[in-house]
Image (cartoon, helix red, strand yellow):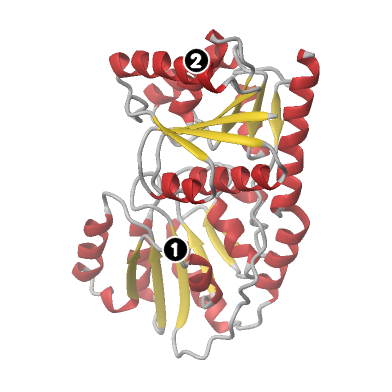
Amino acid sequence: MKILYVITRSDWGGAQAHLFDVIEGMKNSNINCEVVVGEKGEFYDRVEKLGVKVHFLESLIHPINFSKDLTAIKELRILIKQIQPDIVHCHSSKAGIIGRIAAWKERIPSVFTAHGWAFTDGVSIKRKIIGIVIETLVAKLTKKVICVSHYDRNLALKYKVSSTEKLIVIHNGVKDTEIKKTSNQKKDFVITMVARFAHPKDQFSLIYALREVDNVTVNFVGDGPQLQKAVDYAIEIGVSNKCKFLGMRKDVDQILSNSDCFILLSKYEGLPLSIIEAMRFGLPIIASDVGGVKELVVDGYNGFLISDNGEIASKIKYLIDNPTNELGQNSRLLYEKNFNSKAMLEKIQVIYKDIIKLLE
């Protein structure tokens, strides 16, 4: 079995981390994998180190550009002819469109994983309408659409993007780690947020909430176009001494193992991989109640769901004042039960095998 994976960006985000785990898992299952990516960067480098062949397609860019998009379809068709995959599996909205059209033109079955829809709640009306129209059209070219949350599947059904038979839910999963959580011997309560400094993430609301909380340190992991603005904002409101802007890091697991709490604030989400990674370390979670987050965070059981950013400081204070780690222990239990990578990989392989079997 040969699978060609297609993704647009190479910066290290949730979709890239998910796809890397999928590729690594498939490779370990002796499935032949190749990857097409529209950028060179962290994801590209990590996949190459796995010994998996990576194809750089410069025309595969994130913004809509009809000239380059047509070129990308043409060049991807040429690659598909050369590689002769059994299935083309696309990740992220733009690669999903380009990849599925190219695969359909070459009569190769395709699968699409939606890491949150372009028409999800919280986006502009214009973007929502365009997203619904485009996704409805390309869904007709697709054998299966994998939704990473029930929220996303229900959203696709609500807008009649595809059929119930074609839309499959496979929750994101991450592999376990040998790094163990350490007990906090520091004076400060340590919070970590792992996210790009770009919309729809909302580091600014967390920075603002720090005005009301003492004896706390927040690790902001990630880079992006709004990073410097966030640094300046923390200085402006007098909380920079409570913030550590760590940039892009390869030791996120180590940072999480030394944390007391994980926070993710967003305008909208699919099923955030960063929350699952934090649950794996037995951390209580504070997160925006958007998208599929409530499928990870059960309010009051393994953390708190935030619908009003005015609640952020009070939830942090609650965790500081109640040091028992019952919420964190429940996070770990949920991870072990529902979000380990083994089950995710097995379900994806079943989809591949079913598609190939139907074609025989």
Give the image location of residue 349, x and y in percent. 74, 35
Badge 1 amino acid: Lys
- At label 2, counting other C-alpha atoms closer than 10 Å, the crowd grade (few under 14, some 14-19, many 20 or more) is many
Residue under pointer 2 = 102
Q: How far apart are marks 1 and 2 (CA)?
A: 34 Å
Q: Residue at x 36, y 72 (%)?
A: 210
Q: Which residue is drawn at 55% across and 16% down?
A: 103
Apparent side of residue 338 relative to residue 304 in the rendered image (left or right): right
Q: Which of 94 and 185 is in front in this view?
A: 94
Badge 2 amino acid: Ala
Query: Total label count?
Result: 2
Give the image location of residue 201, x and y in percent. 40, 50
Query: Which of marks 2 and 1 precedes in the sequence?
Result: 2
Residue under pointer 1 = 250
Q: Can residue 313 be seen in this view?
A: yes
Q: Which residue is drawn at 50% across and 21% down?
A: 99
* Residue 83 picture quarter: top right
- At label 1, counting other C-alpha atoms closer than 10 Å, the crowd grade (few under 14, some 14-19, many 20 or more) is few
Q: Which residue is drawn at 40% across and 17% down?
A: 75
Quadrant (top left/top right/bottom left/bottom right) for the N terminus: top right
Q: Is mark 1 on a helix, strand or loop?
A: loop
